[in-house]
Image: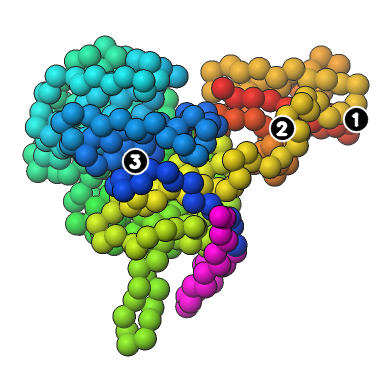
Amino acid sequence: MKTKLLTTIICACSLFTVQAQEWGYVSSLQNEWLRKIWTQGLDTVYIVGENGLIARSIDQAETWNKQYFPTKVALNDIIFIDHYTGFAVGEQGTILKTADAGEHWSQIPETTTSHINAIAATGLDNIWAVGDNSLILHSTDAGETWMPMNILPENDRQLTDIAFRGNLGYFTGNYATVYKTEDFGVVWDKQMVTNAERYAHFYSLNVLSNVVYILDDWNREMFSIKNEEVSWTKQETPMAEGKLCFVNNYIGYFGGVYPIPTCGGCSTPTFGIFKTNDRASKWVFETAGDYRGPIPYHYYFDINFASNTVGYAILGATIIKTPSESEPPGPPQSIETITVTNHLPSLYMEADNLIVSCLSNTIKSIELLDIQGRSLEKHLIDDNHFQEKIDISDITNGVYLVKVIFSDNEVCIKKWTKN
């Protein structure tokens, strides 16, 4: 049964407003403690958790196929580099690999006994993992062998997250640890977040096309830095302990556990999800979701979006999804072109850019919309050209609408799929 919950937050500032959004309970993973979620396209979802759990769903989290790796160690992170090749990492130096989209997993020989907390890659020839005791591992042969990298001068750091976007990469950890690379990891430089506490515990790293966000779990603060800037800016965040997930340069979600004040100066932990449409300038409380069960004291929260509209969140043993329907609402999938012009542009990918080209007229503006018609990005063209490009490196795979306005003000809306 679907449930829509509306929760009221009492806050002295106007940073957060309240809005109902339906997140439906979809978990059939009973009595499992979940740690990390990964989406592969619109339908396939992977989850790893405690006791060696690896679970896969091919129907948007409605049903699951569960596996348990024999060592039963907790798994902390999972990624797929292509449709077939994926990795899961966890405690006691565990690295698992699949070459058949999760049907079978094999263990890579251990190179460490330290816990591995996160993994990221730019390709099969450049895979990185980070963990406890300043652990940094690097593989250049599709994960078959791993080399420890001596990057940090300290050997007692707990490294919590790592992420790349093209040649740009970051990893984070406790004691305000942030390192940056601009050459795929050949050289890593320490970053000073001068307005952060000395004992800040950085995690939940988001590397977008022109800005980077990190969270401080210790003080519940968020920091950002733009590509052209040299210093980090403290951002306003919901007073919650959780995870950050941006689906593009503007739209992001923050979810986790936050305290609701009760009588006598006490507070009750509550699970909630917040959303921003304006680069984290303002957060809107969406819903407490269809959460089932008590809020665990020791928990792992994660949130991941398969597209700009289809998302999943896990907390404890619960999985919720938005929208709660099995299929997201939207225009019929048979629609290919909606046009009021004779000018039909061609759309194709070139590296991380969407190329919009038309030989019969120059282009005045290009707007990218989700399948429900909501605007994601708009580009106004100063000097009209027959061909323009849009950076879509931060756009997740899925179906979109591209609205093109030509110099004679005629309009064409064309469906486009990013794979």
Figure check: 389 above or below 260: above
* Amino acid residing under circle 2: Leu
Residue at 42%, 44% in the rendered image: 28
Q: What percent of the width, then of the height, locates residue 287?
A: 52, 61
Q: What percent of the width, then of the height, locates residue 395?
A: 55, 33
User: Dividing the image into 4 quarters, which one contains the N terminus?
Assistant: bottom right
The dot on residue 214 is none
Local SS, label 3:
strand
Which quadrant holds residue 263? bottom left
Residue at 67%, 38% in the rendered image: 370
The residue singled out by tag 1 in the image is 340
**Mark 3 or mark 2: whose residue is earlier in sequence:** 3
The residue singled out by tag 2 in the image is 401
Q: Judge depth for marks 3 and 2 and give the one in front.
A: 3
The residue singled out by tag 3 in the image is 36
Confirm whether the magenta stretch covers residue 15: yes
- The secondary structure that most of the magenta stretch takes on is loop
* Amino acid residing under circle 1: Val
The reply, left or right, for residue 199 in relation to residue 60 is left
Residue at 74%, 17% in the rendered image: 346
Q: What percent of the width, then of the height, locates residue 299?
A: 28, 54
Label 2 Cα neighbours within 10 Å, binned few <14 / some 14-19 / many ≥20: many
Distance of mark 3 from mark 1, alpha carbons?
45 Å
Local SS, label 2:
strand
Q: Judge depth for marks 3 and 1 and give the one in front.
A: 3
Q: Please indicate, yes or no, whether residue 122 appears anywhere in the rendered image.
A: no
* Amino acid residing under circle 3: Lys
Q: Which segment is the magenta one? A: 1-19
